Amino acid sequence: MSKNRAFPLRVQEELCVGCGLCASSCAYQAIEMGDFPKIDADRCRLCGSCVQSCPVGALEMDEVAPAAEAPKQETSGIWVLAEVEDGALAPVSRELLGKAVALSAKLRQPVEAVLVGGRIAALAQELIACGADRVHVVEAPALGQFVEENYSRVLADLAGRLHPDILLVGATQRGRGLSARLAALLHTGLTADCTELDIDTESGLLHQIRPAFGGNLMATIVNPTHRPQMASVRPGVMKALEADTARKGEVVRHDYSAFAMDSRVSVLNETAEAAGGDSLEGSHIIIGIGRGVKDKACVAEIRRLADRIGAAVAGSRAAVEAGLVDASVQVGQTGHTVAPDLYIAIGISGQIQHTAAITGARTIIAVNPDRTAPIFSVADYGLALPVEEALPQLMNLIPAVV
């Protein structure tokens, strides 16, 4: 029998026949076979698979008492992590504040924004105008350059002291990594790339809704045991409120000037690089190209149409893979989420991976020769025609719907 009596899993050597089934069933490679199974206590997760696989009952495992739960902290506040781009608030920050205000009406908790960086305090009033009741300002010269390790540790310390109930982050280039690192430091869960957020009024839990299983269904995720409840949301999904400069709010300054920054990481230089393709951010009209656009000659016609109506050109994943548009303007679950005044889907079938990313559009026009294509179920106007025949008609239709 194993000499380690303190470990809950033991081998009864007098019963063992040395078949090795326990070792082969262990997903963690915690059992090494010799004359008898040898258990690596550091690797073993006490899952019990080896006990179940043993045909002679030579493995026994004590029932492991669950760890005592730490006393739960009282939590309060719907926090929005404000992101700053070139000295200005990123649009996603205003969008998240708009959603936080709607959640606050159901949860009856204050909306609080968190502003971290160097020389950013002047933006606090703008956050209040966009819906924040309170703004936490962490301003320090060492935070003037974005370093994920430093920002996450500062935010984790702040959240650990103030105990927010909900923390919302933009799923931007910066926000994706920062939110994941922050969730790990706070020992809580994170639902990434949410397309909708809601409050269960009975439990007070945040319903975090996002596409799952390759976009084939919409999953509602909750976090009943850990706080804060964290979710990231792509830019363009939520609607920002109209700024009200007369709104009053509280600005709370936090001194982190003596905070020990991570000495392992430093920014040597930053270089601005222009992205290929059109800019989708702030575009009022977007033309999306899909698999139904067969060649680059047709793309050229679509670009001429886009130039005439002042539209940006984007594409589905299939169009990117076909080389018709640049990957930087891909719209869909693995690309951008957009909310223009008008979205024109040309040759796009309308799978949920794509339609989930365009639901914020005020008006959608679909062009597809297949009358049964799913895109028509979300479109406001539809042309069941080949792309080449539909392009001339679009010029007459667009002024009526813009």
Image (cartoon, rainbow, N blue to C red):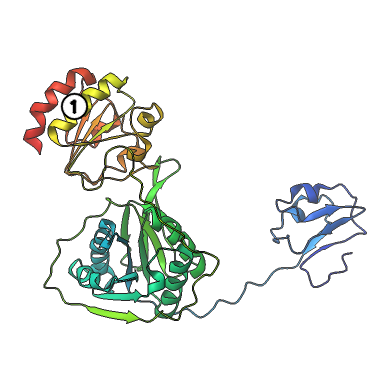
Q: Residue at x 37, y 54 (%)?
A: 171
Q: Position of residue 260 (x, y in %)?
A: 50, 77
- Crowding near the residue tagged with mark 1, few <14, some 14–19, many ≥20 C-alpha atoms within 10 Å: few
Q: Position of residue 165 (x, y in %)?
A: 37, 72
Relative to residue 228, is residue 385 depicted above or below? Answer: above
Task: Return the residue at label 1.
Answer: 304
Q: Nearer the viewer, residue 44 or 122?
A: 122
Is the C terminus in the top left, top right, bottom left or bottom right quadrant? top left
Viewer can see residue 101: yes
Where residue 248 sits, quadrant-wise, is: bottom left
Q: Residue at x 42, y 69 (%)?
A: 228
Relative to residue 312, is residue 77 depicted above or below? Answer: below
- Assign a secondary structure to mark 1: helix
Q: Nearer the viewer, residue 140 or 214?
A: 140
Q: Residue at x 37, y 66 (%)?
A: 167
Where residue 92 sits, quadrant-wise, is: bottom left
Position of 29 compared to 275: left or right? Answer: right
| Residue type for callout 1 | Arg
Q: Position of residue 180 (x, y in %)?
A: 47, 59
Is the N terminus in the top left, top right, bottom left or bottom right quadrant? bottom right
Viewer can see residue 331: no
Position of 107 compared to 66: left or right? Answer: left
Q: Residue at x 29, y 59 (%)?
A: 86
Q: Nearer the viewer, residue 314 or 11?
A: 314
Labels in figure, total: 1
Where residue 341 sits, quadrant-wise, is: top left
